[in-house]
């Protein structure tokens, strides 16, 4: 199924958020100041990936 403009924009925004979260996760793994950061960031990444899939699948 082809994506409309709104869906493409949502996916693009989520990808930008994913990139930022992945950078934060890499930094948190290098310097684990707060042990809660890594699981929280991983959960947020998983949620955004699930949202992207939901948009793609309609």
Image (spheres, rainbow, N blue to C red):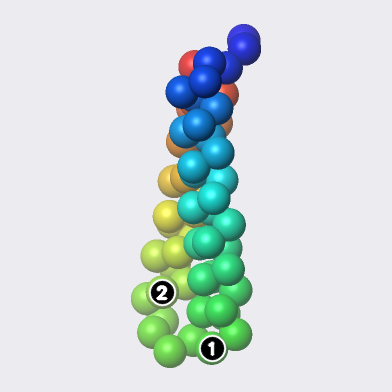
* Residue 18 sits above or below residue 48 on the image: below
Task: Tell me residue 3's x, y (percent).
Answer: 57, 17
| Cβ atoms under marks 1 and 2 closer than 8 Å | no
Numbered disc total: 2
Q: Secondary structure under badge 1? A: loop
Task: Tell me residue 28's x, y (percent).
Answer: 51, 79
* Residue 9 sits above or below residue 39 on the image: above
Residue 50 visible in the picture: no
Task: Tell me residue 58's x, y (percent).
Answer: 49, 17
Q: Residue at x 41, y 74 (%)?
A: 37
Query: What number is the disc on residue 39?
Result: none
Residue 8 visible in the picture: yes
The residue that mark 2 highlights is 37
Residue 26's image quarter? bottom right
Q: Residue at x 54, y 70 (%)?
A: 25
Q: Which residue is drawn at 40% across and 65% down?
A: 40
Q: Which residue is drawn at 52% across and 20% down?
A: 5
Where the N terminus falls, by quadrant? top right
Please tell me which of labels 1 and 2 falls first in the chain: 1
Q: Secondary structure under badge 2? A: helix
**Distance between the alpha carbons at the discs numbered 1 and 2:** 11 Å
The residue that mark 1 highlights is 31
Residue 55 versus residue 46: which sits nearer the camera?
A: 55
Residue at the far top in the pictured view: 1
Q: How crowded is mark 1: few (under 14 residues within 10 Å), some or many (20 or more)?
A: few
Task: Tell me residue 18's x, y (percent).
Answer: 54, 53
Q: Residues within 10 Å of mark 2 (few under 14, many from 20)?
A: some
């Amino acid at each position: 199924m082809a994506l409309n403009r709104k869906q493409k924009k949502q996916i693009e925004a989520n990808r930008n958020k994913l990139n930022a979260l992945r950078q934060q996760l890499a930094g948190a793994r290098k310097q684990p100041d707060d042990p809660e950061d890594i699981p929280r960031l991983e959960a947020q990444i998983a949620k955004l990936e699930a949202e992207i899939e939901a948009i793609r699948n309609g």
